[in-house]
Amino acid sequence: MSILIPQLPDSAALPIMAEMALCSDPSTLEPTGELKNSQAYVMATGGFPVEEPALKLLRHLIVAAARQQGFPERRPRSFLEFEFQVAEILGGWEPLWIDDVPSGESLRNACWTFLTVVVLPDVAIWRWPPSAVAESDKAWKGRVLGGGRNAFQRIHRRVLSLDRGPVHPDRWGLIRELKEDDFSNILERPTIGSNPHVAVCLAEEYLAMRERLSGCSAEIQTRVYREATKDLRAYGVVQPLDLLPREELGALIRRTFLRREEMYGSAHLGQSELAARDPSVHNDPRSNDSLPAAPSDSSDQQSETPQTSEAPTLEPPSLLRRLFGGA
């Protein structure tokens, strides 16, 4: 049965946010007494309201993780380690799960507003300090109110999409290894990032690509990822990626990345080195025909991936031409 997390409407959260915006010392926002709000409510559905000890445990664990990074006196240069620890905590906090499946409560924005404003307001503004115009700053409000960019809900989204599974020896390893831009590249594309089956395979290959192209610039790595993702999304129009078995999906994603690495990374890595890293892609005559290329769109190429001296100007045949037998 569900454990019901209190929900706090935006109308009740905004006055508290105004106080948070004026605060320069996170420690002054430390909650005292019970973790409640008179305007919070729980859904009138089956389940039991979360008990106070569970909320205090969540706060204790996250504050302890923040203290390891300097909370509340200083902020680290990178929050990746802190957010990885928060991901582990949220992955094990019982009210968010029912038999390893996310509960309905974990998907309600108003629940995350309550957890941010009532349970963890000091940690929230330590991680995302208010700007000088915080009351009119929509970006900062998004970090406090529930939603995809909320200070803690965004981390929970990583847990939902990048969980390798409870039997994996390094269950949360993808969240530990990926960087902030990597999360954006994967999770901000709903057609691939919102499906754990696809997102995990994509993240695994993303890390493998970054290792293979460690001698290339970040610009080349980003271009390889963007173009490979376009190819996969185009292929997904013909064959839904989430219906492929894990092994087949992983092989498809790898072939897609290696094709783009060969195209854009060859200026930095010799063909022999690329072949040595995965000989099957270069030795198998079927590999070039196993995946339709993405539709050619010159305007999209110019806006998202500006031409560089390293990249060739010729693109593979478009998806439609390959499907209908064009050259």
Image (cartoon, grey):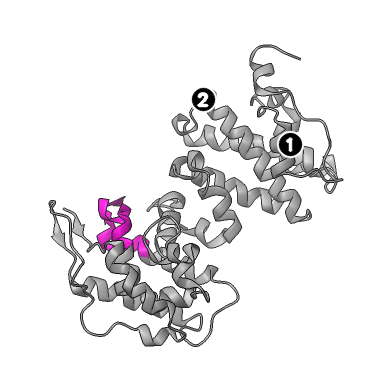
**Is 315 covered by the magenta stretch?**
no
Q: Is residue 225 above or below residue 129?
A: above
Instruction: Tell me the residue at 65%/19% (across/down).
Output: 320
Tell whether 55 sits left or right of 188. left
Instruction: Tell me the residue at 60%/57% (across/down).
Output: 181
Is residue 275 among the parts visible in the rendering?
A: no
Q: Is residue 175 above or below residue 256?
A: below
The image shows residue 63 at horizontal and vertical percentages of 39, 79
The secondary structure that dominates the magenta segment is helix
Find the distance from the CA under tag 2 to the CA under tag 1: 26 Å
Q: Secondary structure at mark 1?
A: helix
Q: Amino acid at mark 1?
A: Pro
Q: Amino acid at mark 2?
A: Gln
Return the disc, 2 or 1, that comes first in the chain's sequence.
2
Which of the pair 66/74 is nearer the observer? Answer: 74
Which of the pair 16/325 is nearer the observer? Answer: 16
The image shows residue 44 at horizontal and vertical percentages of 13, 54
Instruction: Tell me the residue at 83%/40% (across/down).
Output: 271
Which of the pair 245/160 is nearer the observer? Answer: 160
Is residue 263 among the parts visible in the rendering?
A: yes
Q: Secondary structure at mark 2?
A: loop
Q: What range is drawn magenta here? A: 90-112
The image shows residue 267 at horizontal and vertical percentages of 85, 45
Q: Quadrant of residue 8?
A: bottom left
The image shows residue 109 at horizontal and vertical percentages of 33, 56
Which numbered circle lies on residue 279? 1
Instruction: Tell me the residue at 72%/13% (across/down).
Output: 326
